[in-house]
Structures are given as C-alpha cells and as structure tokens.
C-alpha cells in the first residue's frame, strides 16, 4: 500500500543530544514537509522540500536540519540547539507544485520526549 | 499573509446533535481549502476539500462550502456520533505563488467530544 512511514513512533532523547526522525514515502510525491504539533498551537511548519536536493525553512526552523537526497526520504534532525524539542512531529507529502489544488498526506507521527 | 482562523474548542456535544465548527481564512492568491481530522495519537487524515469558490466538500456526513464572499469554510454535520470525537483542523493551500507553492496553513484545531 502507498503511504508515508514515520519512525520511530516514540523517541526519547537526553538533553544535549541530536536525534534524527525518519520519514519515507512511496507515493512518488515531489513535495515533503515537516510539522511540529504542540497542544493548543496547531501545526507549525519546520521545513519543506519541493524537489530532491532542495529545501526551504518554514516558520520554526531554528534548531532543526533536514536533507533531501532521495525523492522518497526526508529525515529531520532535532539538534541540541532546539530549546524545547518535546513535541509531536508530523511528516507529510504532496504531489508538488506542478499538480495544483491537491491535498497533503500525513504519516502517523513521532512523539519525541526529552528526558 | 495567508492564514486560517478556526473556532476554538473544546466542543462537547451529545450524540445526534448538530455540529458546526467555524473557519475563516485570509489568502492573497486562490486557495484550496481543507478539513483534516486527527484521532488520538495519530497523524492527520483528509476529511474533505474544496478547490474553488462555491464548491461543497463532503465526506462521512460532514460538509463544508467554500464561501469566497465571507472567506469562510465552516464544517457541519447534521448528527454526530461518538466515533466523530477527534481534533478537526481547517487548512488552506495557496497554489499560485513562488516558493510557497503548495504549503498548507493550518488553524489551531478544534477538539470535539461526543457523549453517548
């Protein structure tokens, strides 16, 4: 079945450590996104990529990094510079700007907790 | 800039009650509008969408009409069920500008709880 796979579902990190969240899609979508969700704040865009080897900062990129070496994969690294990393992280994909007016498809999310 | 303002919750209803969740938007281009639903501990699922003015999206008894004159996309359901309990997000996507092509702007979400 086509879809978006995020792993792991739960992740615990010690303060001061970097951690990488995985996101893989087999929908042949060009565009991929990372969102952060906190209670009462909705979804905030961290980074997005519309094509392989290219990505742009979203609204809250500080303390995060991404790469887009393959069309299927868009990993997110939460660095030690991110002051408050505990949150629910959602990855999404969409066909891309060449296909207008289409929705995004979401993974099941990764809950990151800093201990 | 582009944004979505969504009715704040939580909303608590009895089974079979009528549901309305208000959503208004601001967009400089020609947005597509979406409602997503999130069940506990899961990602978001598309509930319905409308891509141009006066379009009505519908799915699973939910409906929303794209009203350009009032810049609104209110979600309605005539008779809610316990299984509809979830968080609902209104979102827009602007498809006609530069580097922000296709990105989604979300409202803050509305928690709906339906009691039997």
Image: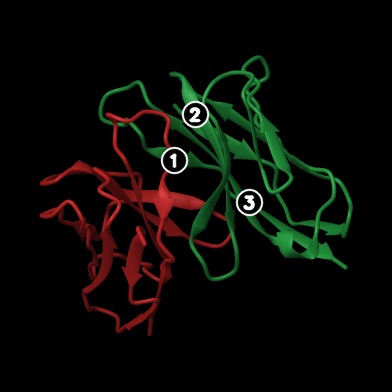
Chain colours: A red, B green
Subunit ID for the residue under disc 2: B
Estimate how packed mark 1 is, as few (under 14), some (14 to 19) or many (20 or more) residues with alpha carbons within 10 Å: many
Residue lying at 29% horizontally and 80% vertically, measured from the top left: A15
Where residue B114 appears, as percent x and y from the top left, is 81, 62
**Label 3 SS:** strand
Q: From the image, tell me which residue sits under label 2.
A: B32
Tell whether A27 sits left or right of B57. left
Estimate how packed mark 2 is, as few (under 14), some (14 to 19) or many (20 or more) residues with alpha carbons within 10 Å: many
Q: Are marks 3 and 2 in contact (CB under 8 Å)?
A: no
As drawn, the label of residue A38 is none
Tell whether A84 sits left or right of B113. left
**Label 2 SS:** strand
**Label 1 SS:** loop
Alpha carbons under labels 3 and 1: distance apart: 15 Å
As drawn, the label of residue B88 is 3
Subunit ID for the residue under disc 3: B
Residue lying at 40% horizontally and 61% vertically, measured from the top left: A107
Would you place residue B104 above or below residue A8 in this image?
A: above
Residue lying at 44% horizontally and 40% vertically, measured from the top left: A103
Mark 3 or mark 2, earlier in chain: 2
Q: From the image, tell me which residue sits under label 1.
A: A103
In terms of image quadrants, where is residue A69?
bottom left
Q: Do the residues marked 2 and 1 share a common chain?
A: no
Tell whether A4 sits left or right of B109. left
Where residue B103 appears, as percent x and y from the top left, is 37, 38
Residue lying at 72% horizontally and 59% vertically, measured from the top left: B84
Which is nearer the eye, A111 or A101? Answer: A101
Q: Do the residues labelled 2 and 1 touch (CB within 8 Å)?
A: yes
Where residue A21 appears, as percent x and y from the top left, is 27, 69
């Amino acid at each position: 079945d086509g879809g978006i796979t995020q792993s792991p579902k739960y992740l615990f990190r010690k303060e001061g450590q970097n951690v990488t969240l995985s996101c893989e899609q087999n929908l042949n979508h060009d565009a991929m996104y990372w969102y952060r969700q906190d209670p009462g704040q909705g979804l905030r865009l961290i980074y997005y990529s519309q094509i392989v080897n290219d990505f742009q900062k979203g609204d809250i990129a500080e303390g995060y990094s991404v790469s887009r070496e393959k069309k299927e994969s868009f990993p997110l690294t939460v660095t030690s510079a991110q002051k408050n990393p505990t949150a629910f992280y959602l990855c999404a994909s969409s066909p891309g700007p060449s296909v207008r007016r289409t929705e995004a498809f979401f993974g099941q999310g990764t809950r990151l907790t800093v201990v | 800039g582009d944004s979505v303002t969504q009715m704040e919750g939580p909303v608590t209803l009895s089974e079979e009650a009528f549901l309305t969740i208000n959503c208004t938007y601001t967009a400089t281009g020609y947005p597509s509008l979406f409602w997503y639903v999130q069940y506990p501990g899961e990602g978001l699922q598309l509930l319905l969408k409308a891509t141009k003015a006066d379009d009505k999206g519908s799915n699973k008894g939910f409906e929303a009409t794209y009203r350009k004159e009032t810049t609104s996309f209110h979600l309605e359901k005539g008779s809610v069920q316990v299984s509809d309990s979830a968080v609902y997000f209104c979102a827009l996507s602007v498809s006609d500008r530069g580097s922000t092509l296709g990105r989604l702007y979300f409202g803050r979400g509305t928690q709906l709880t339906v009691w039997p």
